[in-house]
Image (tube, rainbow, N blue to C red):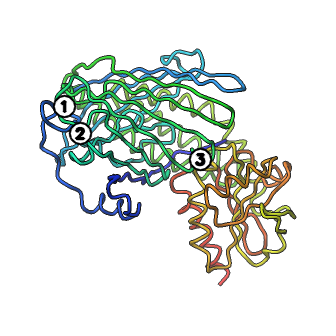
Amino acid sequence: MWSATSPNGRTVARKSVTSIALTKMAILAITVVGCRSEDSVARVAGGLPRYALERGQELHYAGQGDFKYDGGSFESASDWKIWVTRENSDGSRRLVIRQASVHGSKNVTSDDADVSLAYLDLHPDGRFTENSSFGYRFDPHSLFAHLPADENELRSGWDLWVADSDTTFRHTAKTSDLTPTADWEFSRVEDSPRNQVYQLTRETQFAFARGQGLIRRADTSSKQEKGNGSGVDHIELQDVARREPAWIAALDRDLEHYLEVSDRYSKLLKRLEVTIEQAADRLNQAGDLLTKLRAEVTSEVVRDAIDRRIAQHETWNKHRLEEAEKKARVLGQPAPDWDGTDLAGNRHRLADYAGKVVVLDFWYRGCGWCIRAMPQVNQLAADFAAAPVAVLGMNRDSKLEDAQFVENVMQLKYPSVRIDKELPQKYGVSGFPTLVILDQMGTIRDMHVGYTPTLRDDVSKTVAQLLEAKQ
């Protein structure tokens, strides 16, 4: 499975279980348009639990995980460094977060650890808006849980809905009164269509340190019916330290520059040109951006992130050129013919869609990013329902029931055609999901590989251009 990093406009919204009748979209609108002022309750005796972070703090968390299933097991480890670099005017705190994670027996300090460097503007009650720095690896929800808005939510429970992934986090406080204690404990259960597809349940127990105003411990238990798997993950606060103001200022400044250059870097690599020469030129331009950036920053945290990006860039260049070559071979060529049945047994042929723009989504059940992309593909089908456009899933699952299960859970609004294993290769598809766009003459005009938060918009632009060109 392939995935991609791109600007992310995801938004989180809160809803109380006492007002469950509200629709998710109404809740989102209330949160974005009608933001309430910050609660003025104390973080200790008699007050609701609230994050109480101060500029200059450095937090260190460490975690371990273990998951066992019928086919074996795997271990994981993570290391979080968090610096508070700003006290924003809206009451939130700017956090710069470095998360390193590994799978297997490797150490989180190893050169091949997955490292994310991101920022988060955290409000005292845990609210935050997701941003482009998160990428696809980093998930702050695993550590920064949302807290109850008031005493009613404290006693009855509270929900958080994340729009982009359609995930609902349901919270319940173990202690529903306001009696001051060393730790305040609550639990959170995660629910999403992806969890349903993989028959996965996940529950986290949090311990919130009232005196420090932060999460002290998070213990997550997971169980997966498909594959008979179960596991635990544990993250715990190791240390709270202080950094000098000049050090914090340099980190804050350099991170801004790093993110601005990273955005330019991603745009260069997002849509590599058709010819190999053009692709190689863009790769060289992207590498030069990182090299120049390395000389312009002083923060060792940001420099380490740049060094890792440079090493990754050099490692992946060959792969990216190979992908560009595959794409160049199929773009502008007639689409390979196919003839098959959808999941309900209805016949579909490529020839049936002559004269229409066709979007083919190659997917299978075991591809998590395929499932993540499906809501956007559903939206694409709705966007062009009245236009001469056909959106079709191209499913390669060997078991019909696996594909049908996904179709039902994800409530797909477009048909998925059963295909043989050779067809993806004929279309130049090597990573999933891949969306291939055909013009009205059946010629391959564009390809989008992997999940991105902007997938719907990116594909829509190509489809709209092809429709306009036909007029």
For discs 1 and 3, the disc positioned in front in the rendered view: 3
* Number of residues whose C-alpha sits closer than 10 Å to that of mark 2, classed few (under 14), some (14–19) or many (20 or more): many
Dot placed on the residue nearer the N-terminal end, 1 or 3: 1
User: Residue 54 shows which numbered tag?
Assistant: 1
- Residue at screen point 75% across, 63% down: 444
Q: Which residue is mark 3?
A: 196
| Tag 2–tag 1 contact (CB < 8 Å) | yes
The N terminus sits in image quarter: top right
Q: Amino acid at mark 3?
A: Gln
**Which residue extends farthest bottom?**
471
Q: Is residue 53 above or below residue 243?
A: below
- Compute the Cα span from label 2 to label 1: 8 Å
Residue 124 sits in quarter: top left
- Residue at screen point 67% across, 57% down: 407
- Left or right of 46 in this view: 305: right
Q: Amino acid at mark 2?
A: Arg
- Residue 273 placement (x, y as % from top left): 64, 54
Q: Nearer the viewer, residue 294 or 183?
A: 183
Q: Which residue is mark 2?
A: 93
SS type, badge 2 = strand
Residue 118 sits in quarter: top left
